[in-house]
Amino acid sequence: MDDSAAAHPDQPDYPQHWEADVLLRDGGTARIRPITPGDAGRLVEFYEQVSEQSKYFRFFAPYPRLSDKDVRRFTHHDFVNRVGLAVVVRDRFIATVRYDRIDAEGRPSDTGTDAEVAFLVQDAHQGRGVASALLEHIAAVAQERGIRRFQAEVLPENRKMVKVFTDAGYTQHRSFADGVVHLEFDLEQTDRSLAVMRAREHRAEARSVQRLLTPRSVAVIGVSRNPQTVGRAILRDLLGGFAGEPAEPKEPAEPKQPAEPKEPTEPPRAVYAVNRNAPEGTELDGVPVHRSILEIPGPVDLAVITVPEGAVPAAVAECGAHGVQGLVVVTAGYAETGPEGRDRQRALVRQARAAGMRVVGPNAFGLINTDPDRPLNASLAPHLPERGGFGIFCQSGAIGVALLEAAHRRGLGVSSFASVGNRSDVSGNDFLQYWAEDEATEVVLLYLESFGNPRKFTRIARRLAAVKPVVVVKGARHTGSLPPGHAVPATATGLRDATVDALFEQAGVIRVTTITELYDTGEMLAQQPLPPGDRVAVVGNSDSLGLLTYDACLSAGLRPRTPVDLTTAATGENFRIALDTALADPAVDAVIAVAIPPIGTSAHAFMGGRLTGPDDPEMGSDDPEIAAALLEAGVRARESGKPLLLAHLALTDLPLRLREGGIPAYAAPERAVRALAHAVHYAQWRRRTAEAEETARVPELDRIDEPAARALVEASLNTRAAVSRPSPATTLVRGATRRSLLFRTQPGGARITLPDAEARALLDCYGIDVSPTLPAPDEETAVRAAERLGYPVALKATAPHLRHRPDLGSVRLDLTGEAGLRRAHRELDALLGGAPQAELVVQRLAPRGVDTVIGATVDPAVGAILSFGLAGAPAELLGDVAHRLVPATDQDVASLIREVRAAPLLFGWRGAEAVDTAALEELLLRVSQLVDDVPEIASVDLEPVVVAPHGLAILGARVRIAPLPVRSDLGPRAMSTL
């Protein structure tokens, strides 16, 4: 049963957006939602399950049962001054929280900014992080309703509740009187409270994936007598590695000491088969078949569902009733089929989460864990991959097969694998959280087609990439090719590829374009040390192959040395000496060995598909001495911290020999260089990130008036929300009507463009000065405006269809006197169809410099992005714009302006005078701080910004605000509800 549907009252103000699915500390799921009058029975049942001690802690006295008056009080709320939330699992309350608004004297109030808060958690669920999750959500609700501080009274012996408050990270005050601990804490997020929230999120999500990958028992629902069916195939795959004796783990490709196996401490693991129509006593593949999961005598941790789509809801209901922790839904027929299928998919996720279960799928390929102590193959892959250091995630079953096959062909091992299909619940973000903790995973490989939460992905990936490489192939690069069935917010469907690049770049994620490049790069990162720099030595027995490698290095932005050609007659000793010399050179950071098959000096004939000498028709495709030299050099390369890799042509045996020593070999120089270049750039990012943690900062700027900016935005929103005069009965909250409050906090509001005067006033609060403009509807008005501003001036059109279109002749510059201004006004009036229609304005002429464009756009999916580029058609046509996530540091903005291809124009190109980049960087920091401080700001566009040798001038500005918070990543923890 969907408890939220049953609980919704016929209340027009019911805040449905407060409902949220959450992950608890142990990886289980629960639902948080407002308490309504329809919950009276649930509340009474919940209270009966609470111990007498917990009741005493809540009410400070024995309180065995709730009276009818109590029940009414705790279930009837106005959702503004009195709010109650409940945590629900399997349609039962397991915890509640309530706040009551109070005034300065502690009395009930409609206008105060303080509230009393109290929690109650069933004893059986204490220690799961329930109260911590509730505190995050009730605090967010209270802030939305104008409450700025919570007060709580707790008995000293109620240490668990005191710890919930003190560990939350809010700014708080604590006192003790009359045997009671009195706590007061501000609800404004602090750096510490945000860090605490994200740490809890990380632990819960990592734990939920760990539960999926390490079940003690698995049931396959939908097993058939037909050996060709999906359910039967998965049952066989499970038996091959789960309940049977797993194969001995093989050493990973990188030569290192394997971790000591842990002694198994868990109870014996089991596989169960379920088929509703199976006759009594049926066995398949030696496994007894049950007609329902409810008939299985012991616990079941993971269920793999392969029944037809119409039978899935009943199977999920039985799994929930049996206490299953996670589901792998292989069944198709959901969001990939259209709107009706998407509705079924949402219902599936709601049903599973309400019962405390996570969902992999639907339309999933499955999960794999190669841990020799806890192997799992709950997938359609016929064999368990070799053990190794690659964690693999993908959103496509076909690509999943290709990834596993490529790993097998290259001899690369896998730690865990997930192919999640429609990604309705468990996502790549969850696995990133898990792999950050998993010691067996050394490199993460992702195939992504869409983002459910790009902002969160960037945050998690950045933390993971600081310690482990993350390599991504991004499919569906164009909006129109988004695969059907993917759960993606509307804001993320139009995510530009340049924005994705910016997200990856700032997060340290390595983006590649093909599956081959994915493994080329992953193999390099897994088997070789990170290069200390970009200086490359090229050594080999082919001058031509060396030159191709040299050219590829230059194209990839590396700094290669002149190739060392050992000639085709090179021996193993020649290779050994040359490689030792290159590795010992302090001016070399990486070495690429190039090799072709050895060629004799006498006449040759092409026989049997290979080049042979007449005296040695059976000559192999490589020289064992060369292989030995490369293997010895590989040891020295790791000791010196420099990567060594091979680029070869027409060799078959040598790459296999080198695999033993962990030296990656590539069948084309371009592939080797691309892999090395990715490793170089990733190493540079790690060094920059480590340095930035010590030195990067967000400077304290002068002329910042955050309260004034917030007041301006709030006034604008309230003005537009007050579409009618409030009735005398309307409740006022901090000066805003209840109607405007609901308008501002419920989803669905449109973005509003501020009038020029309001936009200038708002920007002025952050020290951003926009050059004033005065309207010029006729010549006389234009002359008076110019006299007021002072000559020289510019005359330009500002109508939306003419704004920033100098190519249409809509701007006249360097007007030094009245005569020239009048002449220009007449010309534009005739050219543009009249001065009023063109919305002509006069503006003081800016100093000459470089025209640039600065913007900040807040996307609900991605967050705030700061953008910079040069103004003009060439930059627009070439897409020469750089991006950074907000808040930006001083180092972020410095690198931002240098990243665009036209950046030399700022630094004195062709003898021109360099412009004031310090002023430009400060302006970027001000814009970043503005959109970070005031979350209602949806976008800021400054165009053009003329940067002169001394100072700059902002000639145009547009600001848009949104009547709801446009960023959700700073809010309480909640699972996606797409």
Image (cartoon, rainbow, N blue to C red):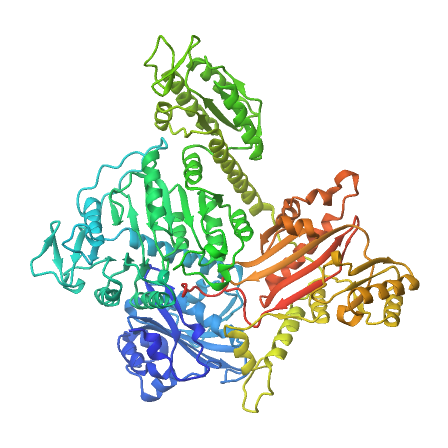
Q: Position of residue 891 (x, y in %)?
A: 62, 47
Whether residue 703 is visible here, answered yes or no, is no
Q: Residue 708 falls in which quadrant of the image? A: bottom right
**In which quadrant will I find the N terminus?**
bottom left
Q: Position of residue 391 (x, y in %)?
A: 37, 44
Of residue 475 and residue 464, the one placed in the foreground of this image is 475
Whether residue 5 is visible here, answered yes or no, is yes
What residue is rendered at 22% in x and 47% in y? Answer: 237
Of residue 275 and residue 299, the one placed in the foreground of this image is 275
What residue is rendered at 23% in x and 53% in y? Answer: 230
Of residue 89 and residue 306, the one placed in the foreground of this image is 306
What residue is rendered at 54% in x and 45% in y? Answer: 689
Residue at the extreme left of the image, as rendered: 281
- Tag count in the figure? 0
Q: Residue 245 falls in which quadrant of the image? A: top left
Q: Residue 943 falls in which quadrant of the image? A: bottom right
Q: Position of residue 537 (x, y in %)?
A: 53, 24
- Name the side, left or right, on which 98 lies relative to 230: right
**In which quadrant will I find the C terminus?**
bottom left
Q: Position of residue 473 (x, y in %)?
A: 44, 46
Q: Is residue 222 above or below residue 317?
A: above
